[in-house]
Image: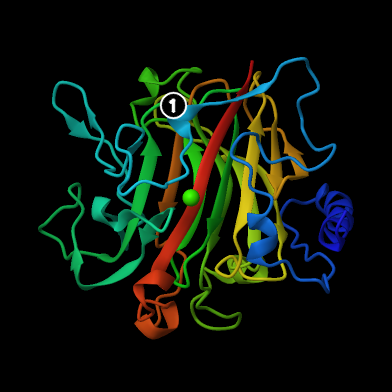
Amino acid sequence: MNKRFYALKIAIIFLILGCTSSSNDVFVPPTDTETPTEEEFTGKDDPTKPTFNNNQDPNHSNKKWVKVTALSDEFEGETLDVDKWNPNPQYLWGSYQQDRGWYGSSRSLFEPENATISEGMLCLEGEKFDNPKYSPQDKTNQPATRRYGGAYVYGKVLSEPGYYMEAKMKASKTAMSAAFWLMSEPKPCKETPNNGERSELDIQECVGVLTGELGDEWTKDDWAIKSNWDRIFHYNTHRHSTLECYNGEQQTRGGKLNFDQKNSEVFHIYGAYWYPDGKKVDFFIDGEFVESVTPAVQFTAPLRLIMSSNFYDWIEETTAEEMGFNNPLEERYTRFDWVRTWKLE
Ligand SMILES: [Ca+2]
């Protein structure tokens, strides 16, 4: 076992001891003197089996992991495989063809052309527009607010309970997010399985650049600054409120750990095993188990698997230079080297 995973194991022990009482505590693991490099992770990639280090595989049955090809991609082609993935957020529903898609947070706009394949990776471009744009859902009698372009790519086949999902990814060097997550389809809740539950499973969410600082006037980002959101493994399950079905408070269960290096500097393999009964989700980093999370309600309905890059509402907007939008295109990419999905058979 290399020193890195020894340090990680110690970190996880502290994480479990430190975070059971309050999931909002910020935990920074001890500094590892041997900082991991991209090369170390590249060597561990094996597309024929899920990434689990020794004794970390949650499968203790006679079944074997089989790849779900419809939700797996090495991104080695020339273009995005549109048989598997949809880069357009539009979601038309019902006889009126109402668009229920999500185009990003209020200052963000997901654009299909921002999702491309380059050098064996899915690249989600982050950009600052010269002039703000409207999403197809915005009211055009009000000023446009969407100043930052991002992307949202989702699997055309839904992900199911019992799947293990993993992605090797790296954040951009911009204030855009890097996210690998799952969400209920944007149907009316009464049309959604599991009694209309709107469920979100975030395997990883972070940003490439944190612009704010504690003590300034913009305080919406204080929690993220305290949590080091630009060098974090941040995983969650959310039970969302809906108007007509579950109308209580949003219920969140999850956790986090911090890295020594920024999410924009190192590729990591972020993984989650969604138990078949929907009662538990195990989260993994680079093949190492981190934590079991029990969602507030059983996650029994299929969910959409998503790779996205958004401009969050809580991010402090500063200069394009500070936010990283003057960086060359290659540094404005959120990169997914691959995504792999597995089930037990
Ligand atoms: Ca690749």
Q: Secondary structure at mark 1?
A: loop
| In-image side of 292 versus 69 (left or right) | right
Q: Label 1, on which residue?
A: 158
Choose between 217 and 223: the one closer to the eye. 223
Estimate the x, y position of residue 202 in percent, counting from the top left: 56, 44
Q: Nearer the viewer, residue 170 or 238?
A: 170
User: Can residue 319 be seen in the rendering of this structure?
Assistant: no
Q: Is residue 213 above or below residue 332?
A: below
Residue 144 coordinates in the image, percent (x, y): 19, 64
Would you say 1 lies left or right of 287 here? right
Classed neighbour count for the residue bearing mark 1: other residues with Cα under 10 Å, few (<14), some (14–19), many (≥20): some
Residue 193 placed where, x, y %?
45, 18
Assign the C terminus to one quadrant of the image.
top right
Residue depicted at x 43% and y 28%: 70
Position of residue 280 relative to residue 205, above or below, is above
Above or below — where is 15 with respect to 254?
Answer: below
Rendered residue at 36%/18% (across/down) = 191
123 with respect to 17 (left or right): left
Residue at x 41% of width, y 64% of height: 333
List x then y, in percent, for residue 17.
Answer: 89, 51
User: Residue at point 54% right, 55% down?
Assistant: 169
Q: Is residue 95 left or right of residue 58?
A: left
Q: Is residue 235 visible?
A: yes
Between 4 and 211, the residue placed more toward the observer is: 4
Q: Amino acid at mark 1?
A: Leu
